[in-house]
Amino acid sequence: MFLSWHDCRLDQSCEPDIYPSGLMVVKSRKQSELSVQRNRLVRATSLHWFHWFIIIASLLLTLGAWHLSREQIRQKVGNQFQREADQLVELVKERMALYENALWGAVALYDSSEEVTYHEWKRYANSIRIDRRYPGINGIGVIYRVLDSELDAFLERQRQWQPDFAIYPHLDHGAYLPITFVEPEGINRKAIGLDVCFEENRCTGAMKARDSASAQLTGPITLVQDEKKTPGFLFMTPFYRGKTRPQDLSERREQMMGVISVPFIMSNLMRGCLLYTSDAADECCGVGG
């Protein structure tokens, strides 16, 4: 039986195949190939375990090298600091030995004289050229031991040369240790008359020098003449009546006349030591004639 064109339009089964099965197969293959290529690209750009291993190992090696380098630098700096510190310590020891010689030189002045007057002390102190030969010290002075029974005569004697001389602070302990002479006088004027027994470290240093008949350092103090109130100390050597050092402790305590004292401001001492090093280096190199 034949259908008319009009009947064929009504029958959908007569409609021609717009998407043949062959085209669908081709499209499916292309999609599959694109998916395979995409997966390959994803795998190619992704990091596998050995990539992570290389990255982590590189980071660890970098950190290790940085830590080792830092420790080497720290050790090098530490060794250099220790060498310089040791050199400074040795330099300070050398300088303190020179300062001690100046102290014993002043003791020798007292051992060779019946009495050292104000003017004789000034001449001696100026002759040793403190500022040139002993950089770093604030001066050199004499501290007398004055018993209470001797106080009036002592003050009268000192006021012949220093009309305003007075002992301060007033301490009622039977004996005084006033700073009596000091050079250079200008920068140390505030210290003149100071009874060093007003403060424990000063007094202990003087008593140790007396009992040991040797040079002694005080504990840390602040010098009354230091306006900046920085750390300092005193270096003391004793001198005795009879012009010799008593061998017995009781004799030393009884015959002590006083101590020669050198005041130090720590910062000035360090500068003096460094100046001495610079001068020594210049001499070695022939600098400055």
Image: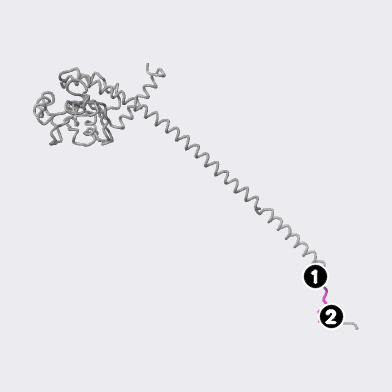
What residue is shown at x 41% (from left), y 30% (from top)? 84
Q: Say whether disc 1 or disc 2 marks the residue closer to the N-terminus.
A: 2
Q: Position of residue 108 (x, y in %)?
A: 22, 19
Q: Is residue 187 visible?
A: no
Q: In the displayed image of the protein, which residue is found farthest to the bottom?
A: 1
Using a 10 Å C-alpha cutoff, classify the residue at mark 2 as few (fewer than 14 neighbours), some (14 to 19) or many (20 or more).
few
Kind of residue indicated by mark 1 = Tyr
Q: Residues within 10 Å of mark 1 (few under 14, many from 20)?
A: few
Could you say which is closer to the camera, residue 53 or residue 242?
A: 242
Q: Which mark is residue 205?
A: none
Total numbered badges shown on the rendered structure? 2
Depicted 143 relative to depicted 112: above or below: below
Asked if residue 46 lies in the magenta stretch, the reply is: no
Residue range highlighted in magenta: 9-21
Residue 13 on the magenta segment: yes
- The quadrant the C terminus occupies is top left
Mark 1–mark 2 distance (CA, rounded to whole Å) = 20 Å
- Percent position of residue 282, x then y: 39, 20
Indicate which disc residue 8 carries: 2
Q: Is residue 70 left or right of residue 281?
A: right
Disc 1 marks which residue?
A: 19
Frontmost of labels 1 and 2 is 1
Locate residue 251: give its quadrant: top left
Q: Quadrant of the N terminus?
A: bottom right
On screen, residue 17 above or below 230: below
Label 1 element class: loop
